[in-house]
Amino acid sequence: MRTGCVVGCVAGATLLLAGCGGNQNTLDPAGPPERRIVHLWWWMFGGSAIGFAVIVGLLGLGWMRRTRPGLPGGGGDRAATAIVVVLGVAVPIVVLTILFVYSDIFVLRSVAAPRKASTQLTVKVIGRQWFWEVRYPGTSAATANEIHIPVGARVNVVGTSDDVIHSFWVPQLNRKIDLIPGRTNRVLLQADRTGRFRGNCVEFCGLQHAHMGVLVFAEPPARFQAWLRNEAKPARTPTTALQRSGREIFDSQACSGCHTIRGTSARGTNGPDLTHLETRQTLAALAIPNRRADLERWIRDPQHVKPGSKMPGLELTKPELRDLMAYLESLR
């Protein structure tokens, strides 16, 4: 029995600590908006801890003096009433008023939807089952599941949904926003250090809701601009016989009906834009890494990797798969 209790306590502590670590740690802010949220959280936690300690202390004092009349140090009903009024009414009113003013003036206003004039970059994010379509208005750049932003820049993320309600949240950068079909919501992303910050859909949106991740890459401005210029370009023209054969296979199969490759006849809109597929680190909304073996597995049997996804399996011969892979790996 004692061993079971110990195991249960260890498991519970592990679960609690798991929620505070990793690259989705809300208490490890990477930008000003999230830092304000974290400060408010610590103030509320501290106030709650003090209040809890006072209550536990009074309960303990009452239990220890349960057989003795009166209060410690004397005093009758008037003293008891004063304690109840001060600790039970006056102190909570003062504390809650301070927290309300602090949260309204210093926190809510700093994390509110940004005005376009106050930001240096706008990114459009469209939630879809089950990936994130990412576009940079003013350019032809389009990608999926990976958002690049320059360090220090105030980025206006404009979000909507193409099917059901999704919710976009990058815990280390700011609060979450709901993405609703037919509407747009906005959130400010601002990172004050370089890094890779993971986010997720946090509104249940179907079978693969848990595998709908997003990465935000905060980069030095020069590196971001180089990435954006490359993403805005059309796809490279195949240079080898294998790549040319792979492009023909892409056009003749269901690929071109679902995906866009800018600069080609592929204009599908059901799946992610693949113009610069090889610049991405992940596939299937972070479900698998973007490596040759994983990409081949994804093409052969996507329902095994991500059940319920709209990606159909392709019954390709080994030579066809080899040629298709050669073409996809050229999309840089």
Image (spheres, rainbow, N blue to C red):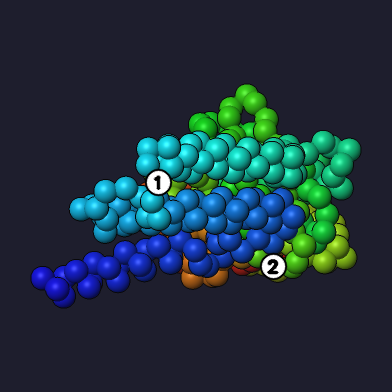
Badge 1: residue crowd in 10 Å (few <14, some 14–19, many ≥20): few
In the displayed structure image, the side of residue 236 where residue 89 appears, left or right: left
Local SS, label 2: strand
Residue toward you, 161 or 110: 110
Question: Which residue, as the protein is rendered here, is positioned at the far left?
Answer: 1
In the displayed structure image, the side of residue 255 where residue 158 appears, left or right: right
The residue tagged 2 is: 195
Q: Amino acid at mark 2?
A: Gly
Tell me which residue sits at (63%, 50%) in the image: 40
The residue tagged 1 is: 75
Quadrant for the C terminus in the image:
bottom right
Percent x, y of residue 330? 69, 65
Tell me which residue sits at (37%, 55%) in the image: 72
Residue toward you, 127 or 195: 195
Tell me which residue sits at (37%, 38%) in the image: 77
Local SS, label 1: loop
Q: Amino acid at mark 1?
A: Gly
Can residue 88 be seen at all in this image of the molecule?
no
Percent x, y of residue 288? 49, 63
Total number of numbered discs in the rendering? 2
Tell me the mark number nearer the camera, choosing from 1 and 2: 1
Percent x, y of residue 41? 58, 52
Residue toward you, 3 or 226: 3
Quadrant for the N terminus in the image:
bottom left
Tell me which residue sits at (16%, 70%) in the image: 4
